[in-house]
Image (spheres, rainbow, N blue to C red):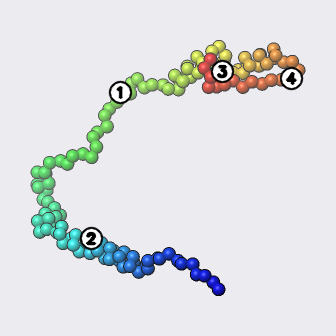
Amino acid sequence: MQTSIPRPYRPRPEPWLNVMAAVAVGMFIGCWVIGPALTSKTDATSQASAKTESLTFEAMLARPDPFPYRTATPAFDNAGQPHYAEAAREKARAEIGSRGADDPWGELQERAEGRNHGRWHYRVPDRHAVY
């Protein structure tokens, strides 16, 4: 004999579908029927039709010029342009010191030759260190 386990009550899905359908119909009627009926006025339609009529040349000249979307670009003084590459090169030369650009590893090679005791040790300089 099997004993049945009582199942918890579950509401049927049909009422929820009916509620969602009623909300969808209400949104449709509100957006497409009631909204345009409330916002349409005779004054607004007459103003819209007046805006679409073409103007004569004299009427166009009588109107003021429209405001520009952006202002004109100001003229900058280009006489003293900065030379960033030259400044960076001078800064790098000041950090390196007396070593020439043709042999940047010369000082390290001299140190390695003086310490060479049967094995070769290679040290890479830290390029982010401040000397």
The amino acid type of the residue labelled 4 equals Arg
Q: Regarding mark 3 in the picture, which secondary structure is present there? A: loop
**Residue to which mark 3 is pinned:** 101
Within 10 angstroms of label 4, few (less than 14), some, or many (20 or more) residues?
few
Viewer can see residue 28: no
In this view, 33 is above or below 56: below
- Observer-nearest of 124 and 83: 124
**3 relative to 43, above or below:** below
Residue 101 appears in which quarter of the rendering? top right
Distance from Cα at disc 3 to Cα at disc 2? 75 Å
Q: In the rendered structure, which amino acid carries the disc numbered 3?
A: Ala
Amino acid type shown at disc 1: Asp
128 lies left or right of 105? left
The residue carrying pointer 2 sits among few (fewer than 14), some (14 to 19) or many (20 or more) residues within 10 Å by Cα, namely few
Q: Which residue is mark 2?
A: 31
Query: What amino acid type should be assigned to the residue bearing mark 2?
Result: Cys
Quarter of the image for residue 29 reads bottom left
Q: Residue 109: x percent and y percent? A: 77, 19
Whichever of callouts 3 and 4 sits on the residue coming sooner in the sequence is: 3
Percent of width and height locating residue 123: 74, 24
Is tag 2's residue or tag 1's residue first in the polypeptide sequence? Answer: 2
Sequence order check, earlier mark of 3 and 1: 1
Q: Residue at x 80, y 23 (%)?
A: 121
Which label's residue is closer to the chain start, 2 or 4? 2
Where the C terminus falls, by quadrant? top right
Q: Secondary structure at mark 4?
A: loop
Q: CA distance from mark 3 to mark 1?
A: 35 Å
Q: Which mark is residue 77?
A: 1
Relative horizontal placement of residue 29, taking residue 120 as reference (left or right): left
Residue 94 image position (x, y, % from top left): 58, 16
